[in-house]
Image: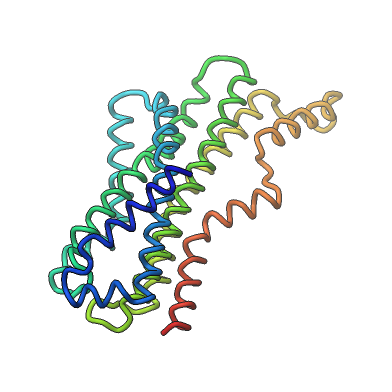
């Protein structure tokens, strides 16, 4: 709770700093819509304060699976490219911000600080997901019995789901803050069309799927390979067929290869969080506007 309060206070303080230094900025920050935007940013920075430690800790735990300089170089480059795609819209807005009459004082500096904080919090999460993928590729080469490799796969799957949930939360809150900003700007010089908030959410959803789906698919494939190696398929007319099928199904259940309704809804919810958030903010914006 303390971390969340500190994060929220820091985000709000950053936006409110010197916000009444000019008449335009004072008029803007005192509007109800701007207050909602400040609250959205405060919620985002509070969330960052809560997840930063766990994301870095997960990265620290899975980093041992990146064997060799080449693996690390590939992971760093891939993570940097992915973050560039995520931050691209924000960076583009910063580059052209001198052409936009943004009403908040020191807007470029404040946006730069928030963008840098977001990158610092998200980077270990993105890298850790790539590391989970690297670890999945190492499981067939790992030593130990099938139970050891089973535990390793289950642990990696839990880490992947945890990472995905935390990063999806960040994307949803960023999208929410973007919608709140659009409502605050209204029809001013720095405003942007309402539908762009939805495009923003769809863009993030697509990028998130690009990051998560291949790693999740590789984990499922590794689990199936482990089952086939530990309990090879036997012909239906074999005396051991029923026992073997039971063993395979039990291991499939442990590895959760057959995703149930609850897990399916959880995964779908993670993917659609940015898109749903953007749609809600667009609808709210239409109502407010």
Answer above or below: position of 97 versus 285.
Answer: above
Give the total of numbered labels.
Answer: 0
Q: Position of residue 46 (x, y in %)?
A: 41, 50
Answer above or below: position of 132 versus 22.
Answer: above
- The single residue placed furthest to the left in the displayed view is 98
Q: Nearer the viewer, residue 88 or 93?
A: 93
Q: Residue at x 23, y 60 (%)?
A: 17
Tell me if 45 is positioned left or right of 242 in this view: left
Q: Nearer the viewer, residue 129 or 220?
A: 129
- The single residue placed furthest to the top in the displayed view is 144
Answer above or below: position of 278 versus 251.
Answer: below
Find residue 203 and report its image quarter: bottom left
Q: Position of residue 112 (x, y in %)?
A: 22, 56
Q: Residue at x 28, y 78 (%)?
A: 191
Q: Residue at x 39, y 41 (%)?
A: 52
Tell me if 153 is positioned left or right of 208 in this view: right
Tell me if 265 is positioned left or right of 192 in this view: right
Answer above or below: position of 205 versus 147.
Answer: below
Find residue 103 and report its image quarter: bottom left
Q: Position of residue 58 (x, y in %)?
A: 44, 33
Q: Position of residue 186 (x, y in %)?
A: 33, 81
Find residue 239 and report its image quarter: top right
Quadrant into which the C terminus falls = bottom left
Q: Nearer the viewer, residue 288 or 216?
A: 288
């Amino acid at each position: 709770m303390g971390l969340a309060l500190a994060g929220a206070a820091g985000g709000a303080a950053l936006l409110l700093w010197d916000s009444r230094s000019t008449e335009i900025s004072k008029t803007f920050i005192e509007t109800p819509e701007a207050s909602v935007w400040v609250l959205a940013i405060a919620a985002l920075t509070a969330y960052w304060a809560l997840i930063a430690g766990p994301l870095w800790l997960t990265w620290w735990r899975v980093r041992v699976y990146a064997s060799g300089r080449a693996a690390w170089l590939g992971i760093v480059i891939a993570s940097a490219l992915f973050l560039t795609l995520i931050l691209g819209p924000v960076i583009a807005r910063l580059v052209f911000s001198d052409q936009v009459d943004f009403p908040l004082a020191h807007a470029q500096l404040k946006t730069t600080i928030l963008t840098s904080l977001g990158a610092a919090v998200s980077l270990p999460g993105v890298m850790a997901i790539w590391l989970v993928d690297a670890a999945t590729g190492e499981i067939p080469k790992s030593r130990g019995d099938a139970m050891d490799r089973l535990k390793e796969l289950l642990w990696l799957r839990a880490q992947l789901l945890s990472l995905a949930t935390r990063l999806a939360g960040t994307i949803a809150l960023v999208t929410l803050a973007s919608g709140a900003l659009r409502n605050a700007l209204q029809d001013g010089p720095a405003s942007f069309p309402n539908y762009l908030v939805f495009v923003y959410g769809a863009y993030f959803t697509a990028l998130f799927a690009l990051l998560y789906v291949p790693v999740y698919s590789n984990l499922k494939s590794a689990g199936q390979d482990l089952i086939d190696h530990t309990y090879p398929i036997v012909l239906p007319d074999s005396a051991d067929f029923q026992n073997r099928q039971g063993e395979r199904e039990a291991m499939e259940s442990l590895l959760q290869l057959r995703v149930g309704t609850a897990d399916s809804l959880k995964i779908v919810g993670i993917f659609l969080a940015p898109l749903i958030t953007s749609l809600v903010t667009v609808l709210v914006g239409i109502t407010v506007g």
